[in-house]
Image (cartoon, helix red, strand yellow):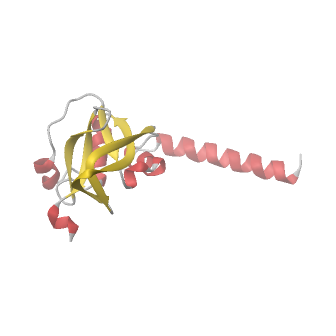
Amino acid sequence: MSRMRWKAAALGGAIVGLWGLIAHMPVYLPPVTPAMLDAQPAQDSGPQDVFGYATLKHSLLRFVVIGRPVSAAPAQLEGFLREGRDLRRDSGSVVAGQVFTVGPEGLLRLDRYERLGERYRRDLRTLNDGRDVWVYQLLPAARQ
C-alpha cells in the first residue's frame, strides 16, 4: 500500500474513532438558571421546529450544542430583517435561514446555548410555508 493510502486510512480511522468517542460522550449541561425558568415559553413534549438564522444555521454548531447530528432545510421568515445576531420587524424583508427539528432535551440545550432569559428570548413565529417554529431573538438589554 502506498504512503498516501496509509495516510488516508489513518485519517479515516481517526475520524471514525473520534466520532465514536463524541457520540457516546455525556454532554455537560449546566443547571437551569432562574432567568431561563422565567423566560421559557410553554412547549409540547414532542418534536419542536426551530428556525436558525445566524449561528444555528451551521450543522457543526448544532451538532455540538444539541449533542447529535441534526439535519436542516432552507426556510424563510417574512416580515423580519436580520441585523447581526438579531432580528427586527420589517414588513418588506425576508430572512433566510435553516429549519430543524429537536426534541424537548434538544430545545433545552439550545435554550442554554442562547442563554435564554439573559441574552435571548424564544418566540413562536410562522415561516413562509406556514410552519410554526421557535425563533431566538436578542433581548433589548443584550443589544447594547
Residue 134: percent from left, percent from top: 25, 41
Count every numbered label the image shows and give the total.
0
Q: Is residue 30 visible?
A: no
Horizontal relation, residue 102 to residue 1: left or right: left
* x 58%, y 47%: residue: 18
Q: Quadrant of residue 20?
A: top right
Q: Which residue is the extreme one toward the bottom?
A: 144
In the figure, 15 relative to 130: above or below? below
In the figure, 40 relative to 143: above or below? above
* x 39%, y 55%: residue: 55
In the figure, 73 relative to 55: above or below? above
Q: Quadrant of residue 128?
A: top left
* x 32%, y 49%: residue: 94
Q: Is residue 95 visible?
A: yes
Quadrant where the C terminus is found in the figure: bottom left
Q: Which residue is the extreme one toward the left?
A: 38
- The residue lying toward the viewer, choosing from 77 and 38, is 77
Quadrant where the N terminus is found in the figure: top right
* x 63%, y 47%: residue: 15
- The residue lying toward the viewer, choosing from 133 and 66, is 133
Q: Which residue is the extreme one toward the right?
A: 1
Q: Which residue is the extreme one toward the front?
A: 92
Residue 6: percent from left, percent from top: 81, 49
- The residue lying toward the viewer, choosing from 26 and 51, is 51
